[in-house]
Image: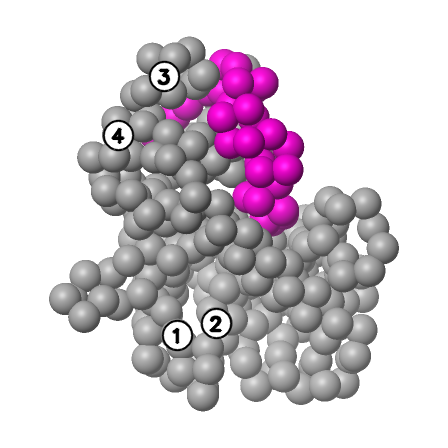
Amino acid sequence: MQDRNLSRVPGLPGPDSQFATIGGPAIQAIPLRGGDGEAHQLLSASDRRDLAMIASIRHIDAGAQLFEAGARAQAIFNIVSGVAKVSEDLADGRQATVAFFFVNDLLGMFESDHYIYTGTAVTPLTVYCLPVDALERLLLREPSLQMHFLCKLSHELRASQRQAIALRRYSAMQKMALFLDFMALHPEMQVDATGLMKIPMSRADIADYIGLTTESVSRALHRLCNEGIVELVTSHQFRIHDRARLDRLVGGDGAVSLFRQKGG
């Protein structure tokens, strides 16, 4: 793995002294019980300190791998800043993008001690690296923390299932609209106060994610622009011009929530 400035937490030296401001690993999800249907920070200050004590912070260059499918799982990762993706190796040698991960997300799913997918930094990443063995001991010792991780994993599973249903029944234009709405929900994608948002991933990654070809992604995006629903400022920046029409295009609030419940 290509990383820079690997340090233990707390007490990071020099410019990597982020513990005081970051406060330790953080995860957001819609609670399993109660709540208002919105994603919230699940971990208490004590939970975050406990996780920080077993973690290290790593800075990953854009394009570098965090982990490789089939490799022995040594850690899971909690994103502090940046965007990551996980990909599946196909029989023809290509990789298909399975999911994107943002601030406060967990990635590094594994089974039988080995990673299922390959994880790659889409943008420069700062992550908490949580060693699997130490995390397992901590979760066994702290049932409430174990419940929080279960809540986060359940949240991600629900979002994936809803997404799969939506992408099977939506047109190319609806899929692209849904993806742009999904991106706009992440504060770290906001460029400025005018509503300008960034798209850090490639057209090929987007196409894999929403089940289209790259050509169909481009056509759908330009149609959204031509109809005045969004403005494509650059190839990697957009602005939603007509929120009401975007919501109607993807079926109203109920349909939009298919991606919106991703949460963080």
- Disc assigned to residue 103: none
Residue at image coords 59%, 49%: 262
Residue sitting at 39 percent across and 74 percent down?
116
Q: How crowded is mark 4: few (under 14 residues within 10 Å), some or many (20 or more)?
A: some
In the rendered image, residue 58, in percent from the top left (x then y), is placed at 47, 62
Quickly name the residue at label 1: 116
Q: How many marks?
A: 4
| 2 or 4: tag closer to the N-terminus | 2
Amino acid type for the residue under numbered disc 4: Ser
228 in relation to 92, above or below: above
If you read the primary sequence from the N terminus, does the residue marked by circle 1 or circle 4 appear first? 1
**Which kind of residue does numbered mark 2 sit on?**
Met
Return the residue at label 2.
109
Dividing the picture into quarters, in which one does residue 232 lie? top left
Question: How far apart are the two marked residues, 2 and 1, measured between alpha carbons?
Answer: 6 Å
Residue 262 is inside the magenta segment: yes
Question: How far separated are the C-alphas under marks 2 and 4?
Answer: 31 Å
Q: Identify the residue under disc 3.
A: 225
Residue 204 shown left or right of residue 251 in the figure: left
